[in-house]
Amino acid sequence: MQTQYALKQAGLTLPVTKEFQQHITTLLANQVLQKITEAVVINFRDPDYSAESGGFHPVEIRFIRKNNEWYFDYVTDFSYMGRVYPELEKEIDFCWSGNYVFHYLIGDILLAAERNELWSLWERNFMEYLSMGIYRVTVTVESC
């Protein structure tokens, strides 16, 4: 029997859809999470993504456990930046624990309506890429 996980938000409140939460909770339910597990990091990688040819951006999602409940910590979308020596850098960062939303061209996004709009756009695209089978998914457990 798989454990059911409810994902909670604290700090930020973004319009996270049920479909997104269901996909993530399915990934979590397939993991053996011990009582000492403090956080879980899920990485989504397009193996063909490179600075030269582009592709689908890598995404990292982290959840933290507080009082035996799981909370969003951050969702970060990375992209290659720079021309001569490109490096993976944060393009979009939704951070619940830090209570901020960041986009590399704009900086911190302060208005709730703009945060919500960016989340909805990002999530819709991310879910579409998942449905296309683009990503290789790895889950890393952080324990004390």
Image (cartoon, grey):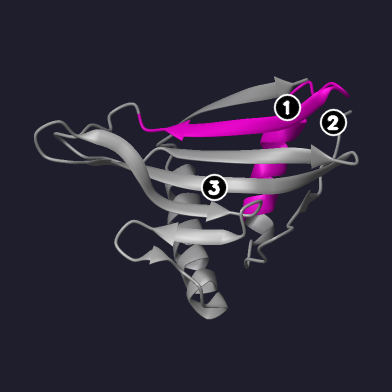
Q: Give the extent of the magenta segment.
A: 20-46
- Mark 2 highlights which residue? 2
Mark pair 2, 3: CA separation: 24 Å
Image quadrant where residue 80 sits: top left
The answer for how far apart the CA atoms under marks 1 and 3 are is 20 Å
- Which percent across, then down, holds residue 16? 64, 61
Q: Secondary structure at mark 1?
A: loop
Residue type at tag 1: Asn
Residue identified by numbered label 3: 75
Image quadrant occupied by the N terminus: top right
In contact (CB < 8 Å): disc 2 and disc 3: no
From what the image shows, is residue 106 above or below residue 48? below
- Residue 106, position as x, y percentages in the image: 34, 66
**Image position of 22 (left or right of 99):** right
- Give whichever of 56, 91 is nearer the camera: 91
Task: Report the amino acid beneath label 3.
Answer: Val
| First reached walking from the N terminus: tag 2 or tag 3 | 2
